[in-house]
Amino acid sequence: MRRDIYQAIADPTRRAILTLLTVGALTPNAIALHFGSSRQAVSKHIQILAECGAVDQTHSGREIYYQLNVEKMKEIDHWMEAFRKLWETRFDQLDNLLGNI
Amino acid sequence: MISFSKDFANKTMHIVREFKAPHEKVWSAWTESSLLDQWWGPKPWHAETKTMDFKNGGHWLYAMLSPEGQAHWSICTYQAIDPPNSFKHTCVFSDENGKPLANFAAMHWLVEMSGNKGVTTVNITITFDDITGLEQIVKMGFEKGFTMGLNQLDELLG
């Protein structure tokens, strides 16, 4: 299955996990505590986030901590920036046309 | 000035832009194919309408043409037309006969405009059925070069 950053944000629980991780690295247990769902369900989402490259893991003793991969998240902004530029170009063209009709 | 905002949770994007032109002119530019073809395709691409029937349930079938003549077709279906204030259309990538391509999400557009003293404000709300639809559209535009020349891409990523 295709794994990219857009799949990471396609699910509301995963978006919530990403939001949670903006404040710092957390263990899967700590993440699961924030949600009404099971540890197992949360683990599945974390696994997808990791496969998408949205989060990185670090080991500290016996614990695994997950943190946001900020660089990867910026990809979304790059796409959005491209889309914004498309509209700027389009609207400049419309400005020119409106001056001529 | 262009205002651009995204709301992933609601799978929508909002675009707001003012034009120094009378309301009726801006409405015409959005709803007449001979005018749309002159601005809809962001350079170096250009848009070419095959058929357009601007009425509720009517379609706009057009191609985005590259400088080399490569065509990417889209078909849009109009709804809720309220001249000269607003209309909706749902657009999908299609073949040249307007048959939608599989695996591409639809984009639902609401285009609203209001005029005041020769300035017209256009409000666009684009909604996707699924967030991956947003990605497809942006990626398609990006890869096919609708969005910018390579130099601009370098600038952006640099």
Image: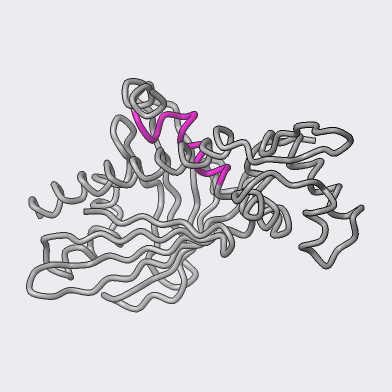
The coloring applied to the image is one colour
Q: Nearer the viewer, residue A97 or B119?
A: B119
- Picture coordinates of residue A24, whole percent (x, y): 64, 46
Q: Residue furthest front?
A: A61
Nearer the observer, A18 or B91: A18
Q: Is residue B45 above or below residue B106?
A: above
- Left or right of B37, for residue B118: left
Q: Residue at x 45, y 58 (%)?
A: B13
Q: Where's the N terminus of chain A, which quadrant?
A: top right
Magenta region: B135-148
* Magenta part, dominant SS: helix
Quadrant of the image occupied by residue A101: bottom left
Give the residue drawn at x 77%, y 40%.
Answer: A65
| Residue drawn at 76 percent across, 62 percent down | A34
Number of numbered discs on residues:
0
Asked if residue B139 lies in the magenta stretch, the reply is yes
Q: Which residue is pictured at 66% across the width and 38% down the height?
A: A54
Residue sitting nearer the eye, B136 or B153: B153
Image height check: is A29 above or below A4?
below
In this rendering, the answer to whether A56 lies above or below B11 is: above
Whether residue B106 sits left or right of residue B116 in the image: it is right
Percent x, y for residue B57? 49, 70
Question: Is B96 left, or right, of A51 in this rendering?
Answer: left
Which x, y percent locates residue B50? 40, 46
Picture quadrant of residue A55: top right
